[in-house]
């Protein structure tokens, strides 16, 4: 029975057309139950190769081939190397475009397929030949090319990343013809019945939705990536493109299992060397007064013998009375002896007295005058405080008019180039001749063993070390951690301290450079070794590449 075509019937027809061409059907060669691809589809096709000296990554970007060349052990970029590629289309000579980056034009990369490369690398007298295979998926090769504006029925391909599966299918011509015929019939009947409005909108929407997958996807959706992006996977593995590694300045070291001396962590502080420092004290109590030019400020360099201050001794009332009495007695004696000398001089002219009597009187007069002058000087002359050694003024407690107590420390002179470290050891361990001090800001200083105390100090034995490295930026009183080597030996892998991080669960981790652009977090057990290194005793095997610089930046990739 024939009846009018309703809007419901037209909608069902449109949905049927949409289902027939929906892109949700399984592509040829694509398994929906397969595991997720290791890298996002936005990553450009790439291949890698490595040897004991070199590591390189080939990246296909359109018809351009980008090469990143690094040292295998350190991951440092290698600029200025001589690189030659043997390709299916002949030899290529890449051109250096940056630090460790080389490019070459390869028109054959516009076609999908598998391309074998033999790369000859020569740098600093080292020559090596590396081989690899670069797979260019169909989508990456066709998008953006002239074929992108071709047939309406050109199929779509889905690139799953480097090493991933490439799937795709083409819509059959008979299906496209059937859809076109069904659409024409629907429109004809609609016009014949003059049913517009909702029916027309439904039919046009259905036809448009059905025909949308027939058009080729844009280059932005499925085309080759123009910029690779670092990413972290669910298992914690990181994919970091070589260009990003160069920006982050990632460096690695090849682990080796060796025997190292065990180190002790001791609390300590920096002290002045007793052979190059001194204290300025007042021998008697008195009032302080500045030298000419005033008191020297902190940090001023001084020489041994430089006057730093004066101390004016106070004169008690009893002493002042005694000194006044002594002064009057001396003045009286000087007056008597002066007259005697004058009389003897007159008598000596006529030889009435011996010459010796005159000389004795003159000597007596001179002695009395000297005693009188010394008595005046004691009352007026202050005590000069001088620097005992060469150095700088590290501390002072001087104010004009201040009363200084006897034996009070007024100035402390320190030679900043000669400093010691005093550490406290709570274990009976034999310390080796070398040690290292670690400051709060991470700086380190080399130490030479000086001596160990024989008596305990707060149940600890003091150990003195001399700072053997540059002392600039150090000051007396700073607290440090002393890593002192002992005679005990322990086997493990030594890595820099900055290579070991704290994971989200609090466990210590390091990042292993497993492939050219892959990094895996490894949980490790570490023990202190020295100021710059720690000892990995479990978690990493020898011969692995561990990130030593930039690990903290690597850990922030999400």
Image: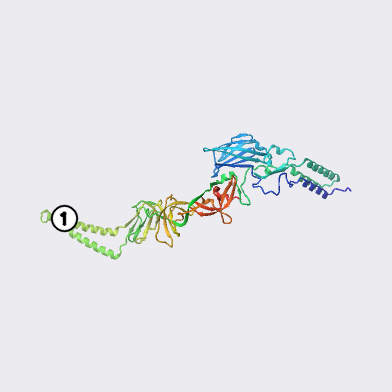
What colour-coding does the image apply? rainbow
Number of disc labels? 1
Closer to the camera, 220 or 123? 123
| 73 relative to 524, above or below | above
Q: Furthest residue to the bottom?
A: 318
Residue 337 spot, x, y in % from top left: 18, 59
Q: Is residue 470 left or right of residue 247?
A: left
The residue that appears at 24% across and 63% down in the rendered structure is 326
Closer to the camera, 462 or 5? 462
Closer to the camera, 244 or 183? 244
Residue 145 falls in which quadrant of the image? top right
Closer to the camera, 347 or 485? 485
Q: Under tag 1, what secondary structure?
A: helix
Q: Is residue 296 left or right of residue 507?
A: left
Q: Furthest residue to the right?
A: 1
The residue that appears at 56% across and 55% down in the rendered structure is 507
Residue 212 spot, x, y in % from top left: 75, 44
Q: Which residue is mark 1?
A: 359
Q: Is residue 507 left or right of residue 300?
A: right
Q: Furthest residue to the top?
A: 90
Q: Is residue 374 left or right of residue 119?
A: left
| 257 relative to 114, above or below | below
The residue that appears at 63% across and 50% down in the rendered structure is 233
Residue 38 spot, x, y in % from top left: 64, 47
**Badge 1: residue crowd in 10 Å (few <14, some 14–19, many ≥20):** some
Residue 108 in sight here: yes
The residue that appears at 25% across and 63% down in the rendered structure is 324
Residue 423 spot, x, y in % from top left: 44, 57
Residue 81 in sight here: no
């Amino acid at each position: 029975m024939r009846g009018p075509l309703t809007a419901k019937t037209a909608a069902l027809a449109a949905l049927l057309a949409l289902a027939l061409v929906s892109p949700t059907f399984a592509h040829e060669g694509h398994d929906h139950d397969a595991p997720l691809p290791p890298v996002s589809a936005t990553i450009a096709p790439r291949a890698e190769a490595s040897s004991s000296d070199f590591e390189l990554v080939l990246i296909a970007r359109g018809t351009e081939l980008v090469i990143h060349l690094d040292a295998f052990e350190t991951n440092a970029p290698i600029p200025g190397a001589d690189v030659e590629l043997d390709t299916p289309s002949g030899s290529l000579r890449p051109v250096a475009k940056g630090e460790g980056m080389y490019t070459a034009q390869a028109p054959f990369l516009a076609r999908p397929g598998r391309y074998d490369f033999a790369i000859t690398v020569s740098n600093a007298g080292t020559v090596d030949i590396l081989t690899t295979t670069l797979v260019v998926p169909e989508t990456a090769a066709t998008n953006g090319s002239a074929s992108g504006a071709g047939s309406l029925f050109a199929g779509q391909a889905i690139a799953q990343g480097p090493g991933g599966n490439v799937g795709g299918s083409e819509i059959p011509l008979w299906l496209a013809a059937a859809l076109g015929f069904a659409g024409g019939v629907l429109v004809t009947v609609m016009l014949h019945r003059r049913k517009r409005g909702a029916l027309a909108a439904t039919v046009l929407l259905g036809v448009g939705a059905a025909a949308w997958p027939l058009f080729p996807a844009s280059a932005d959706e499925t085309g080759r990536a123009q910029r690779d992006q670092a990413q972290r996977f669910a298992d914690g593995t990181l994919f970091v493109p070589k260009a990003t590694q160069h920006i982050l300045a990632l460096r690695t070291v090849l682990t080796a299992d060796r025997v190292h001396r065990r180190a002790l962590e001791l609390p300590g502080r920096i002290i002045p060397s007793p052979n190059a420092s001194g204290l300025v004290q007042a021998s008697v109590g008195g009032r302080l007064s500045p030298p000419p030019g005033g008191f020297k400020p902190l940090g001023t360099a001084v020489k041994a013998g430089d006057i730093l201050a004066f101390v004016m001794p106070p004169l008690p009332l009893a002493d002042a009375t005694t000194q006044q009495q002594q002064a009057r007695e001396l003045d009286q004696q000087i007056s008597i002896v002066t007259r005697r000398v004058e009389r003897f001089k007159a008598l000596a002219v006529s030889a009435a007295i011996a010459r010796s009597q005159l000389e004795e009187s003159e000597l007596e007069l001179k002695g009395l005058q000297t005693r009188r002058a010394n008595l005046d000087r004691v009352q007026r002359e202050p005590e000069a405080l001088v620097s005992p050694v060469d150095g700088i003024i590290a501390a002072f407690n001087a104010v004009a008019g201040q009363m200084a107590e006897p034996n009070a420390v007024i100035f402390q002179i320190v030679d900043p180039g000669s400093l010691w470290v005093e550490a406290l050891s709570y274990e009976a361990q034999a310390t080796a001749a070398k040690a290292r001090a670690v400051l709060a800001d991470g700086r380190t200083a080399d130490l030479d063993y000086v001596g160990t105390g024989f008596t305990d100090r707060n149940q600890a034995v003091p150990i003195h070390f001399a700072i053997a490295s540059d002392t600039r930026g150090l000051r007396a009183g700073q607290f440090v951690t002393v890593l002192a080597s002992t005679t005990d030996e322990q086997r493990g892998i030594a890595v820099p301290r900055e290579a070991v991080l704290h994971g989200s669960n609090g466990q210590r981790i390091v990042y292993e450079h497993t492939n050219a652009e892959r990094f895996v977090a490894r949980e490790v057990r570490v023990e202190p070794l020295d100021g710059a290194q720690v000892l990995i005793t479990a978690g990493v095997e020898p011969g692995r590449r561990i990130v030593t610089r930039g690990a903290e930046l690597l850990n922030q990739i999400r």
